[in-house]
Image (tube, helix red, strand yellow):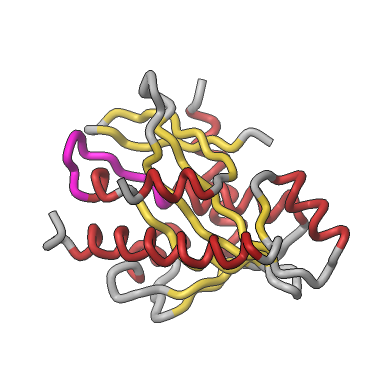
Amino acid sequence: MQANPHVRDALEYARLASKRWTYYRQHGETATSLPELHSAVQRHPRAEIAFLLIARASWQPDPRLIGLAYCRRTWCHRLVVDFVAVHPRVVGRLHARIRGIGTGLFYGLIEIADELGIGMIWGEATANSASFYEKILGAESVLDQFHIHGETMNHCRRELARIHQHQP
Amino acid sequence: MNLTSEADVDGQPKPVQMRFGDANDLAELRR
């Protein structure tokens, strides 16, 4: 399974995210809920706060973790996406072919940004992920970085609204 | 705020729940 570059990326991102989370946690610079993030920003408007957004397979009786985004709210009130990892067993298609996890996480980040009044999300794109960002952002070409703001953000909001329309 | 999305599982749309996580979730990602 590790021959799959996306599986290798997922394992590497999980390792790096754990390391960074521990560092930020030790410095009291993490949030584990939206109210916690809100209040951290209100207390220290220029604080850099790390948080994790996780996705669980809620169609399963015991919903397993299927993806995770490691992010930071920066001192100038933007969101940086450091890592987006889909669980290696999902990437490796061990049980079923599951698609749309990364997309869902990004749309979740748009909702969080809107809640916090944040107008830009940015991050690094790798050779393996650039095409993913082109697709979800409706962008013609993404090189080694992506920026979600303005019309790109509106595009993601419309896609999210379309998904919610189909949900019971 | 209720963060939900949708995944395509073997061609069928399925609901995905999102929430803030912690170190336990990171450990689960590595299992």
**Which quadrant holds the N terminus of chain A?**
bottom left
From this view, report whether residue A1 is shown above or below residue A75: above
In this view, the residue in front, A139 or A65, is A65
Give residue A4's position: percent from left, percent from top.
16, 60
Q: Do we see residue A150 in this rendering? A: no
Total labels drawn: 0
In magenta stretch: residue A94: yes
The answer to whether A127 is drawn above or below residue A97 in the figure is below
**Image side of residue A117 versus residue B12, left or right:** right
Q: Residue at x 70, y 61 (%)?
A: A28
Is B22 positioned to the left or the right of A73 in the image? left
Q: Residue at x 76, y 54 (%)?
A: A116
Q: Position of residue A84 (x, y in %)?
A: 43, 59
Place of residue A37 in the rendered image (x, y in percent of width and height, measured from the top left): 73, 53
Residue A153 included in the magenta stretch of the image: no
Q: Main SS of the magenta segment? A: loop
Residue A3 placement: quadrant: bottom left
Farthest residue toward the right? A43
Q: Most extreme residue toward the bottom, as rendered?
A: A144
Give the residue drawn at x 50%, y 33%: B17
User: Which of these two is toward me, A73 or A116?
Assistant: A73
Q: Nearer the viewer, residue B28 or A131?
A: B28
Estimate the x, y position of residue A165 in percent, counting from the top left.
Answer: 54, 30
Residue at 63 percent of width and 63 percent of height: A26
| Residue A79 seen by the camera | yes
What's the magenta region?
A92-102
Report whether B12 appears left or right of B19: left
